[in-house]
Amino acid sequence: MEEKVLICEDSVEGVFTAIYEIYEQHMDLDTTRVQTSEDENIRLFATYQSVTTDLEKANKVTGTIRKRLGEDAYKDICMALTTTDADKAQAVFRTVVTGLRMTRGNKIAYVMDNLSDDSVRKVMTLSRNAGNELHHMIEFVRFEEMTQGFLMARFSARNKILPVMIPHFADRLPSENFIIYDERHDWAAVHPARRDWILVEGAGEKLHLLEDKLSPKEMNYQDLYRHFVDKIAIDERRNYELQRNMLPIRFRKYMTEFQ
């Protein structure tokens, strides 16, 4: 049979909209693919369809996944979709199909336990990789006070974890104005004090103007902290190989004690 390829936005909402359209249009589940980018070489005997992101449709798929596959499966699927893997959308689609086929009545289908399925195993692997990076970034991210009075943090993640990272800090710093900027993907999470945070794409050019504009108090504290870290170090016990294992070099560009 002719293959159907749906091209959607590279986001959770985009992929969920594509899944909604597949079921809404009664497409053949076994000959349909979901992708977040077009093929470099067009597939033979395949038709392509672009999907426009629709939040209402995406929310319906979200509700179905959470109700029939469970919260844990929903979290793993969302984490997998933060990665840059080219086949993540198809793996998620096949995982949802498998899970819905497993459901009986009102019972939750624990599809993520079915690791013998290639798609489920791929989603679990992607979710674990993104989750590990998320935990690292939460631990190692450094905020700096700017001259304008708000807090600023920069990092560079391999996966697009900023949307699942910002709630952690918004919950702990509700009364602070702060910005967290992902340099690799060039987007920023902006959190006004006591208000909801928003995502801003292409923020690098404007944020570049704020570089080297730290408040005097911030510069003093950074000097004190670097001095403290230097003084507590024991030269005879330095182990750079162990340090690299515990603290990857790619994080150090954004850490005060290594600047």
Image: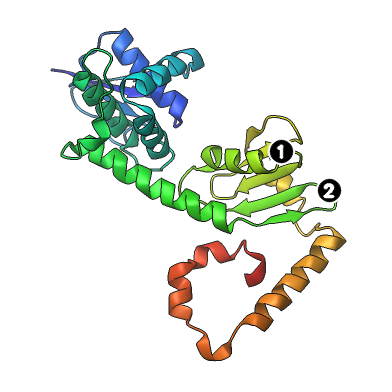
Residue at x 23%, y 29% (from the top left corner)? 43
Query: Which quarter of the figure has residue 140?
Result: bottom right
Instruction: Please state if 46 lies on the left or on the right of 67 as rendered.
Output: left
Residue at image coords 46%, 68%: 246
Task: Give the image location of residue 29, x and y in percent.
Answer: 21, 18
Q: Residue at x 42, y 52 (%)?
A: 132
Within 10 angstroms of label 2, few (less than 14), some, or many (20 or more) residues? few
Mark 1 is surrounded, within 10 Å at the Cα level, by few (under 14), some (14 to 19) or many (20 or more) other residues, namely some
Q: Give the residue displayed 72% in from the left and 71% down from the top.
A: 225
Taking depth in this image into account, of 249 and 7 the one nearest to the observer is: 249
Give residue 13's position: percent from left, percent from top. Answer: 46, 24
Question: Is residue 202 positioned above or below 34 on the image?
Answer: below
Return the disc, 1 or 2, that comes first in the chain's sequence.
2
Q: Position of residue 121 (x, y in %)?
A: 24, 41
Badge 1 amino acid: Pro
Tell me if I can see residue 21 in this picture: yes
Instruction: Identify which amino acid the numbered label 2 is placed on.
Output: Gly
**Residue 174 has which mark?**
1
The answer for how far apart the CA atoms under marks 1 and 2 are is 15 Å
Left or right of 43: which side holds 204?
right
**Which quadrant is the C terminus positioned in?**
bottom right
Residue 216 percent location from the top left of the image: 86, 62
- The answer to whether residue 50 is visible is no
Query: Outermost residue toward the left?
Result: 1
Residue 4, picture quadrant? top left
- Give SS at disc 2: loop
- Which residue carries the number 2 mark? 149
